[in-house]
């Protein structure tokens, strides 16, 4: 079980044209999943593979993802770890799966995570203020 969760939200300009591929890229970039160093968009491709599989609800192994995308297992594991750290992907039954079965639900879960994190920060800030006499 992972206890550290990295939530990154970035303000990225939405694509002008309706194009599901660009919209998915925008969504992932807005969630801080993809960056400029990922030249071959391998993290995006891993994310898309998990999205495509989400309806079936069957976890995919890193080997299955690597084979399907023509990537090395090491590359896939690297990106899966990033997706696990974000809380968007979970480990299940010897594989990996999106935390929920659709993107709307995924954003709702991210929102809940953010709210919990902000509430913890608020509580700690209040305790620190009290101890400092503020």
Image: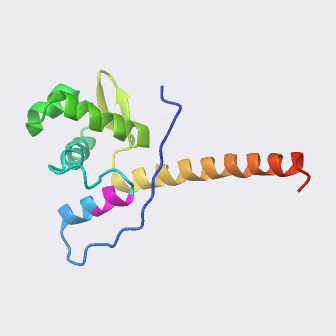
> Quick check: is 51 in the magenta stretch?
no
| Residue 113 x/y as whole percent | 54, 47
| Residue 115 x/y as whole percent | 60, 53
Q: Is residue 6 visible?
A: yes
* Point 28% across, 34% down: residue: 78
> Quick check: is 28 in the magenta stretch?
yes
Asked if 57 appears above or below 121 in the picture, the reply is: above
Outermost residue toward the right in this view: 133
* Point 80% across, 51% down: residue: 126
Q: Is residue 87 visible?
A: no
| Residue 2 x/y as whole percent | 48, 29
- Drawn side of residue 67 relative to residue 86, left or right: left
Count of picture labels: 0
Question: Magenta residues?
Answer: 26-30
- Drawn side of residue 120 relative to residue 95, left or right: right
Viewer-proximal residue among 97 and 114: 114
Outermost residue toward the bottom in this view: 16
Q: Residue 134 is drawn in which quadrant?
A: bottom right
Asked if 68 appears above or below 124 in the picture, the reply is: above
* Point 29% across, 53% down: residue: 35
Q: Residue 26 is drawn in which quadrant?
A: bottom left
* Point 21% across, 28% down: residue: 74
Viewer-proximal residue among 61 and 75: 75
Tell me the chief SS of the magenta region.
helix
- Drawn side of residue 65 relative to residue 51, left or right: left
Viewer-proximal residue among 41 and 69: 41
Q: Residue 84 is drawn in which quadrant?
A: top left
- Drawn side of residue 69 relative to residue 31, left or right: left
Image coloring type: rainbow
| Residue 24 x/y as whole percent | 26, 59
């Amino acid at each position: 079980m992972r206890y550290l969760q990295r939530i990154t939200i970035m303000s990225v300009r939405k694509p002008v044209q309706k194009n599901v591929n660009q919209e998915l890229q925008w969504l992932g970039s807005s969630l801080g999943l993809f960056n400029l160093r990922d030249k071959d968009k391998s993290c995006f491709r891993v994310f898309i593979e998990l999205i495509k599989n989400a309806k079936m609800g069957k976890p995919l192994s890193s080997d299955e993802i690597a084979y399907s995308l023509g990537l090395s297992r090491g590359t896939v594991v690297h990106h899966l770890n990033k997706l696990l750290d974000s809380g968007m992907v979970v480990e299940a039954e010897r594989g990996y799966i999106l935390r929920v079965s659709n993107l709307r639900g995924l954003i709702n879960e991210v929102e809940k995570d953010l709210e919990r994190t902000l509430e913890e920060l608020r509580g700690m800030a209040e305790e620190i203020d009290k101890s400092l006499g503020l």
